[in-house]
Structure formats: structure tokens, C-alpha cells
Image (spheres, rainbow, N blue to C red):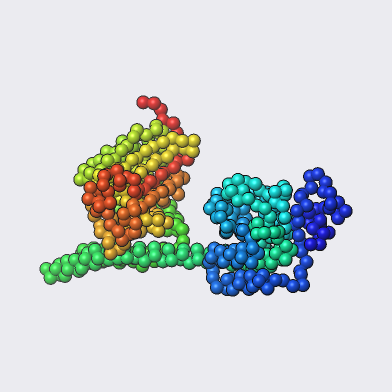
Amino acid sequence: MDKALEQKNQGLEPDRAARPAEGQESPAASAHLQPRASIDPAKMTLLLNAAKALASTTDLDQLLNVIGSEVRTVLECEGTGVVLYDEERDDFYWRSVQDRESLLASAREEIRIPKDQGVGGWVFRTGHPALIHDAAGDPRIYRKVEDKSGFLTRNMICVPLKTMEKALGVLYALNKIGGSFTEEDVEILMALSTNIALALETAAQYEKLVASYNELERLNRVKNRILNHLSHELKTPLAIIEASLHNTERRIRAEGLDSSRFPFERIFRNLERLKSIERQVGYIVERKGFRERELVARFLDHLKDLIEIEKEDEPWLADALDAIRRKIEELFPSEFEEEAGVSARAAFQAAEFRVRRMTQGRTLTIEFPPPDPAIIKLQPQIMMSVMDGLIRNSVENTPDHGKIVVKGKRDPNGYRISIRDYGVGIPESEQPNIFEGFYPVQEPDLYTSGRRYGFNAGGTGTDLLKIKIFSERFGFNIRFESHRCSCIPTTRDLCPGDITKCPCCQRIEDCYENGGTEFVVEFPPELVLPEEPQ
């Protein structure tokens, strides 16, 4: 090795190389190497095989395993590894590692290396390779890797993995068998590192494309599910209504009566509007996020003004329009008055009374532990709409002999209401879609509309959409966690609706441990007031 170059890379002057000053880095070689005239044919074969692997697969982990095996064979060393920089955590992690005793490989998940430590950190920062003959005497070695894995490093090569735009990580060759690594070994790894860096960059772009494709597939699946659902929910009953109206109109004419005296035209016109919903949903679903909620909110903001204008133009409609306005204000108030609020205890008592009355035909354990006292600055009808919708959702997804727990807790971040059911749970593939509206979890051909609060009752799927709209209009948050019952993992698997009839459960508690969903409504501190003691 060129001694002056080695000293330069160590930060030492040439005439001081023999006796490094205290505090200087170890004289273990970190080389920025000049090309050699010839290279061992076996090592050239390594580069050729690496290039072939690059061209044959888009699976980065498979590629790194192939290259790692080739490096260990050709350089005759005990281990190899690729360590990458994690921008979010600002440290290094092992993307791929191989060693003879699998010590590093078995511990790689728990080994993280600080950015500013280790030989890898030095190589990453400087962009220069490091050739270390005596690892025991080099202060740059990050000893916690050895402590956690049990792998003892005697010598190593570490080279940077970087593209023209940025540094990605480092490549290691560890513990030469029967000797020390050479300058030629360093040159081979430097040449190989360029290929690996390009593969890493390509893999990152490929993963982004795959993620985009998967998102498009998800949206397409949502669209198809919604259209099928609407076809089931709307098309058939609307066709029956339309046919019945036509028959009624014909009978009226047959009786010699003037059909224009009856509101058939208005009814048919509104039927056409309902039928157009199916066509409009396709447009709504293609828009990402919750744009439909924005449209609904914007529409509600202007609807009351529109009603007032219509009353002026059509005075004879005043009573009907006032009734519509009152219903809209009840369901979707535009803003709440400062003094408005509802007692959490009163809301829980009302919710418990309603749910027990509506579930008299079910065999369920529904627990309402006394909630922490507080005043929630929200109109009572909005609070009850949120609680009723979430509790009903839990009831309809929990089989008989199941359990639901509804809690209200004060915490430093405000107030949280949780509705935890021990029911069937939501398949992971469907969880991103449940706030979309008109979206049933069941497959369309298995879907049935049942009595409200009955198990698997179905419905239009608008409750959760409405609650999401409320959360965005009034400043609270809603989230959920769910795990699907392992006995019915897909949307085509059906629960019998009664734990005692489930072939997977030997006892009722088995079901409690095997699935369920928890919705949490979080009110920030500005929406929470202390409740005066009674």
C-alpha cells in the first residue's frame, strides 16, 4: 500500500506516521487506493457474477444474498454485510449480513449503529474505504455490535455505498480466513460497491412504483365494492318503487282521474336523482382522501342560505323548507355556541339506555363503567350521534355471547371515549376504507341487510362517514385499531353469529382473545371543561 496515501487518509503527516500522536486515529489502514495492473481472475469473476445478478432480479434482498455469498467465497472471509443509513432515525441498520456461525445474522434486527460511531460511520462521513488489519486495536470499532452478537472482529474492509447524489451506507468484508485482507481486496469491494449502490437506488424507485400500483389497486377495489353495494342497496328497491308508481298511475287513469293532480312527476324526478347516486359514486371514489366529506361540509355551509332564498321565491313552500332546515340544524349544526356542551355522564347514561333497549333480542355483555366526569363542548345531538353510531357498529360486528366495553377517561390530552368490542374485527386489507362511506366490509354477493343492532346487520356504511365529517367540522379526532378473528381471516369467511356455535372456540373467552375492534374518540383540551360535582 502507498504509505503516504494511508497516512493522509488517517489525518496524519507522512513524517509522523510511525509514531501517531495521542488522540489521533489508529494507524490501521484506511486506504484511498490506486488501481492495480492486474487482478486475480477469481475476483474478476466475482464482479461478473454480481453484474449478472443485477440484471436477473429486482429483489434487492435476494441480490444482496447472492453478492454476499460470492464475496465470502472469493475473498475467503467469515462474513459480509451491507449497512444502510436510516434518514428517519439518523442511524445505521443491517440490510443484509452473512457470517459463518450466523451470529451477526441472528442479531441483525436488534443491532443499530449510531451515525457518528463505528468504522462504518467514519467511512460514511469521509467517503474513503477502510482497511483494518487489527480490529482489537482500532478505537473506531463499535464494540456493542460484538457485545450483542458475539461475533469477534479480527480484521475488516469497509467501503462506502454512494451514488452521485448521496451516500447510502457501507459494505463490509469481515475476518479474512488464514491471513489479512489486501489492497486488491479493497479494490474489488470498491468496484462492487458501485453496483450495489445503483441496485439500492433502483430498488427504492421500484418499491415506490409498487406502492403506487398497490394504492391504485386498492382504490379500484374500493370503487368496485361500492358500486356493487349500491347496486344491491339502491337499484333493486328503486326499480320496484318505480314500477309500483307506474302501475298506480295507470290505475288512476283507468279510473278516469286526472293523473296530473298527483305528484307523480316530482316523485319520478327524485327517483332519477337517487338512481344517479350510483353513477356519481364512481367519480367520488376516484378522488383520493376524503374529498367527499369536504363536498358535504361545503354543501351544508350554504344549504340554509339556499333554503331562505327558496322561501322568498316560493312562499307556499315555507313550512316544508323550515322543517328541512330544522332537521339539518339538528343533524349537521354548522357551529356550536360557546356555552353548548354535554355531560359525559349524561351522554353515557343515555347511550346505555338506548343500546340496552335496542339489543333486547341479542345475548351480549355490554359494559358501561362510570365515565370520568367532564363537560364536552359539543351539542348533545352530535355527541349522541357519535356514540350511538360507534356502539351500533360494535354491536353489529359482535356475535352473541360476545362483549363490548364503553369507557370515558380524562387524560392530559383532553378526554377519550373508547368503544372496544371483542367481535369479528376488520380484515387488514379493508381497514383503510372504512371511513369512505357506502363501503361494506362483506363481499357484495354475501351481503345482506338485516335488522339494526342484529349481528352482521349490514347497512349503507354511512355512520362512520358521518362521524368522520363531525370530527373534521368540530375539532375532535377519531381513530381505531382492529385485528380480524383468525377463524374468519378474509371477507369471504363468515362468523356463525353465536360464540357457542363457533367450531374454533372451546369456551366463550376464546373468542374474546381472537379478534375485535376499538374505536377511540379524542377530544382536545379546548373542548373539555370540568364538571361541577352533583
**Camera-nearest residue between 69 and 350:** 69
In this rendering, would 507 be left or right of 311? left
Q: Quadrant of residue 22?
A: top right
**Camera-nearest residue between 305 and 152:** 152
In this rendering, would 417 be left or right of 192? left
Q: In this view, does 396 lie above or below 532?
A: below
Residue 157 in view: no
Residue 487 in view: yes
Task: Locate residue 450, reporting x and y percent.
Answer: 24, 55
**Camera-nearest residue between 354 and 497:** 497
Residue at (45, 41) in percent of width and height? 523
Task: Locate residue 234, reporting x and y percent.
Answer: 28, 63
Q: In this view, does 200 lie above or below 112?
A: below
Q: In this view, does 363 lie above or below 263?
A: above
Residue at (26, 47) in percent of width and height? 506
Q: Quadrant of residue 203?
A: bottom right
Residue at (59, 63) in percent of width and height? 68
Quadrant where the N terminus is found in the figure:
bottom right
